[in-house]
Amino acid sequence: MFRSGFASVILTGVCFSGMTVGVVSAASANILVPHRAVYDLELKDASERSGISGMYGRMVYEFNGSACEGYTVSFRFVTKVDTGEEVKLTDQQTTTYEDLKNGNFRFLTRSFTDEKLDKEVRGSAHEAKEGVKVDLTSPDKREVDLAESLFPTEHMLEVIDHAKKGEKLFESRIFDGSDSGDKTLITTTMVGKLQQPVASDTETGDADKAGAMAAKPYWPVTISYFNDEASGDALPIYRMEFKLYENGITRDLTMDYGDFVLTGKLADLEMFKEGDCK
């Protein structure tokens, strides 16, 4: 039902059909810091079509590793959804491993409703000569050949790189193993001007939970996700807005699923020791 929104990126790239591709160096990737971020989720808006009268929850995002040893992401997205007739507990748990040097990516997602497993998607992907080759092992075994794409950490690095260069709008193709793990997505990213922290960030926002990061500048970022096969003026299947720091930490999230919108406010931020990468 939900997407995490923490999607892919890459630093050095060339353009093809308006989209960026490239290779990430260890030095470039070392800007990302290992951390654990907890966000409190609340319903901001919902249409009648959504069937949702209330919703709240918590999202936990843990990022570990280095460009040398690879990056591991553990992500959990738990919500209670009130339809007016019943309350459902949804729980999405995702673990990924991304090897930037060798172009490999592993993913596992389990989705639960009321503590019962609804779906499990497990597989791996690697960069091939003509795109990305995906090997799925669950829910069934099969191989899928996809177009050249960025993996999630690559995509985050790409966003940061474009932001540093002052490039406000760009498009990318990504593969993050979400949904059924057999499709790529097209993303359109808009990056605003670098913002300096102000008092209202703490008074009305979630900067007070960001620790030392509250004093750092950030970029306002909006990423829209589209089905790769969509044509014409297609509507995004999902859109995410957030404040992005140079080291990859995000806060003040807005997640727009079309029929309903969630906000995610930073509730806790723990920085981990950075590993050596030579």
Image (cartoon, helix red, strand yellow):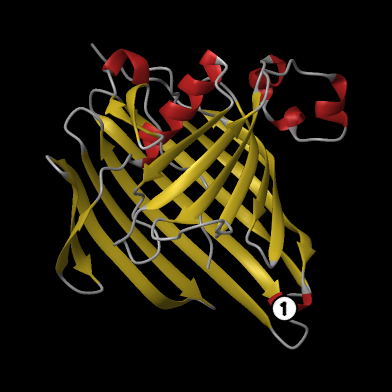
Image position, residue 275 (x, y; %): 33, 20
Look at 20% across and 63% down and name the residue there: 136
Q: Is residue 245 above or below residue 156?
A: above
- The answer to which of 228 and 158 lies nearer the viewer is 228
Image position, residue 3 (x, y; %): 51, 57
- The answer to which of 162 and 267 lies nearer the viewer is 162
Amino acid under disc 1:
Arg
Query: Which element is circle 1 on?
Result: helix
Q: Which residue is mark 1?
A: 49
Which of the 4 image quadrants contains residue 85? bottom right
Look at 61% across and 46% down and name the residue there: 240
Image position, residue 124 (x, y; %): 21, 53
Q: Is residue 242 above or below residue 175?
A: above
Camera sees residue 28: yes
- The answer to which of 234 and 67 lies nearer the viewer is 234
Q: Give the position of the C terminus as an image quadrant.
A: top left
Camera sees residue 51: no
Look at 56% across and 70% down and name the residue there: 90
Residue lying farthest left?
Answer: 129
Which of the 4 image quadrants contains residue 245? top right
Residue lying farthest front?
Answer: 232
Image position, residue 274 (x, y; %): 39, 20
Image-based side of 269 in relation to 6, left or right:
right
Look at 52% across and 41% down and name the residue there: 188
Residue lying farthest bottom?
Answer: 85
